[in-house]
Image (cartoon, rainbow, N blue to C red):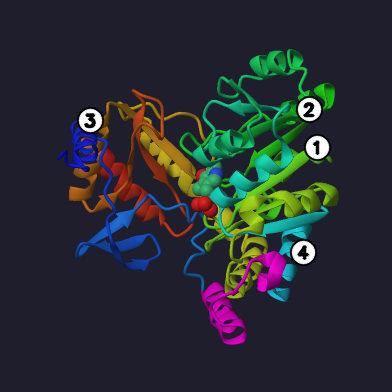
Amino acid sequence: MTDPLAAFEHDLAQLASAHLIRKRPAVEAVEGAHLRVAGQNVLAFCSNDYLGLSQHPALVEAAQRGAAKYGVGAGASPLVSGHSDAHEALERELAEFTGHQRALYFGSGYVANIGIIPSLVGRGDAVFSDALNHACLIDGVRLSRAETHVYPHNDLAALARALEGSTARRKLIVTDAVFSMDGDVAPLREMMVLCERHDAFLMIDDAHGFGVLGPDGRGTAAHLGIDSPRLVYMATLGKAAGSAGAFVAGHATLVEWIMQRARSYIFATATPALVAEVLRASVKVIREEGWRREHLTRLIARLREGTASLPWEHPESFTAIQPLIIGGNAEALAAMTALRERGIWAPAIRPPTVPDGTARLRVSLSAAHSEADVDRLVAALRDVAR
Ligand SMILES: *Cc1c(COP(=O)(O)O)cnc(C)c1O
């Protein structure tokens, strides 16, 4: 008799020796960027709650109101009876806010991407995908069975060559708008020019731009002034919007097609209507409380000034994502541990999330941080780097 679990145990031991075992700290209390974890108070720089909305009183109140009105479960998929007037209003407001004809709400960004891409392309079509795209874009591309061309990160010349060489029936470029581990922005304007030239569509994942970039936080497409019937705009709502979910927006025809075809939309129970009410309140706050973006911008500048003297590379990024590249997995983990001993939580990100040899501290800033919080981080980083 062989032990049926021996192979898994062996593989887990291998992950452990490569410093690749992941742990899930259980957070016990949250107050803005200050968390209590395992009885210790920590100042966190690991959240994607970029505007500090996850505990905003208007959003909490919307959740309570939504629960009182709709209960806490949708009971069915949206195309059966799970779609409420709250979801309907949210989609209308998201479309209007981002300047598109129509929007469709999904329960999460991962679920959105693995549904949207296969609804747009299949066998006989081609996808052109940035080498640093988020895992759920990669998975969506795989599920689509379209021919896949991965181009080097933000390399427009390579992208143009790949488009030129393709005879596929339909072509779709897929890219993060703001790259999740580097914080840099894709050259979307130039990519849209390539789309026009090669009769392609452009799908952008604005998980880290929506709410943060663009006029009133309308996102990266608005920031760069892109508007085209070839644009498939996707953004998530669990980050700057402070709650959960995602949406796709664009020309009404495209959105209707996605609603008819995206399997992860059709075959999943709708998100509770109370979440839609929370997100409606969130869009309103994103729009009205511009001071949150201004404060965040000041914090980013303050951090970059403070890290200039560190021995680690700090790549150009004007977004809330501020990576400090350390290199080795063990070294990145050691830096994270040393920060934790100083009451600061900045996550070490290792392969396969980032390329080998580029393990890093992924510092993310939020409007929930104060200038003193950033100063504390900078002092701790200097201490740890020494
Ligand atoms: C976080 C993230 C997602 C996944 O969104 P969820 O709502 O967390 O499932 C998708 N794309 C990018 C670029 C992300 O950073």
Q: Residue furthest front?
A: 1
Q: Name which residue lies at 47% across and 69% down.
A: 55
x%, y% of residue 303?
Answer: 41, 42
Tell which of 171 and 28 is nearer to you.
171
Q: Identity of the amino acid at label 3?
A: Ala
How far is disc 2 from disc 1 in space, using C-alphas? 8 Å
Q: Earlier in the sequence, mark 2 or mark 1?
A: 2
Tell which of 49 and 5 is nearer to you.
5
Task: Using the rendered image of the protein, determine whether residue 210 is visible from the camera's viewpoint.
Answer: no
Identify the secondary structure beneath mark 2.
Answer: helix
Q: Name which residue lies at 36% across and 35% down.
A: 307
Q: Is residue 171 above or below residue 68?
A: above
* Residue position marked by numbered label 4 in the rendering: 92
How far is disc 1 from disc 3 in space, using C-alphas? 43 Å
Residue 335 shown left or right of residue 65 in the figure: left
How far is disc 4 from disc 1 in space, using C-alphas? 20 Å
